[in-house]
Image (tube, grey):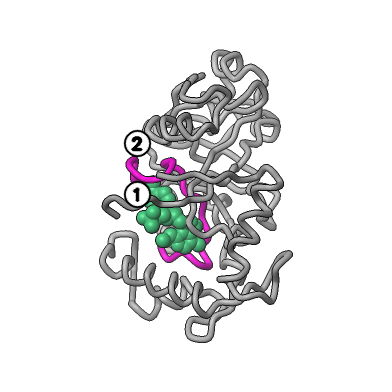
Amino acid sequence: EGLGVQEYTGIKLQVRLESLNATPVEGRDRVKDDKPVGEKLSSPAFVEALGGRKLFLVAATLRPETMYGQTNCYVGVDLNYGVYEVSDSEAWVCTERAARDMAFQSLFKEKGKIVKLADLTGWDLVGVPLSAPLSPFDEVYTLPMEGVLPTKGTGVVTSVPSNSPDDFITLQDLLKKPAYYHIQKKWVEPFMPPRPIIRTPNLGDIAAQAAIEKLKINSQKDKKQLAEAKELVYKEDFYQGTLLVGEHAGKPVQEAKPLIRKLLIDRGDAFAYCE
Ligand code: A2H
């Protein structure tokens, strides 16, 4: 990437705190080391620090037109995240590096000023329910992904398995080995197979799956082929894809992309974010 500026769309996935707290901490599913899902988010210290603000995981994407296909969100389990004050009514979860960029892009209350309300790790977020804008599902879950880089975007990746080979293969891995990854199948199974959102002439309606099969990719570990699949799907979708769903159904991806980005930003579900 060198010196180039990457223009992302920051997608706001709201943490469903009421839904989480509807089950007492002791009654919840467990993640690693027998920790109840969302234990920290429900702790008195965290609740006080949050001060009644809405809480969002913010994901950086290059594909805002695919948000109709969101099925979950990914975090790196061993990454450190902060909960940053955005305003008196909102706080965002992202890496500290992203918070610094955001502060200087005037996304927070006071330009250049960072107020961290709490610290989290990826494990504190696994299994936590979210609402994802434009997704057909009311509630999606936060899941672990091995390749989330702390040095890119916000360290939070929203998942669209129909159009991202990385997202698809990760869900497949999680379903194959739920115990190994410390996840529940019910966080994945209802969302698979993915629903079509973009039609393409050469890779069909679920381009990510077609590319994975074509390149014989078996798991997240097949890094080289995954990079190739990513490139293949990105080009096919962008130059030949047509939206199948939503307000801009029937339009070519190239045309729909900026329109859907604007729609998300106008609704307050997204923001422009550069790095
Ligand atoms: B994209 P680029 Cl449908 N670590 O969003 C790893 N991957 C990250 C990340 C991080 N910290 N931050 C963002 N990303 C992912 C959607 C999507 C994406 C689709 C298809 C392809 C695709 C849904 N996931 O990306 O290195 C995010 O996933 C392939 C280009 O800056 C983001 O867009 O080019 C993309 O990588 C940004 O990658």
Q: Is residue 177 visible?
A: no
Q: Amino acid at mark 1?
A: Glu
Q: Position of residue 151 (x, y in %)?
A: 32, 42
Residue 153 on the magenta segment: yes
Cβ of mark 2 under 8 A from ligand 1: no
> Which residues make up the magenta segment?
148-167
Q: Amino acid at mark 2?
A: Asp
Q: In the rendered view, does 139 fall on the left or right side of 237? A: right
Name the residue located 34 percent from the left edge and 63 percent from the top edge: 219
Say if 191 sits above or below 121 in the image.
below
Name the residue located 48 percent from the left edge and 85 percent from the top edge: 202
Query: In which quadrant of the rendered image does the C terminus lie?
Result: top left
Report, in whole angstroms, how far the alpha carbon at label 2 lies from the one at label 1.
Answer: 9 Å
Secondary structure predominantly adopted by residues drawn in magenta: loop
Q: Earlier in the sequence, mark 2 or mark 1?
A: 2
Image mark for residue 146? 1
Residue 22 on the magenta segment: no
Identify the secondary structure beneath mark 1.
loop
Depth check, front residue: 135 or 65: 65
Q: Furthest-right residue in view? A: 247
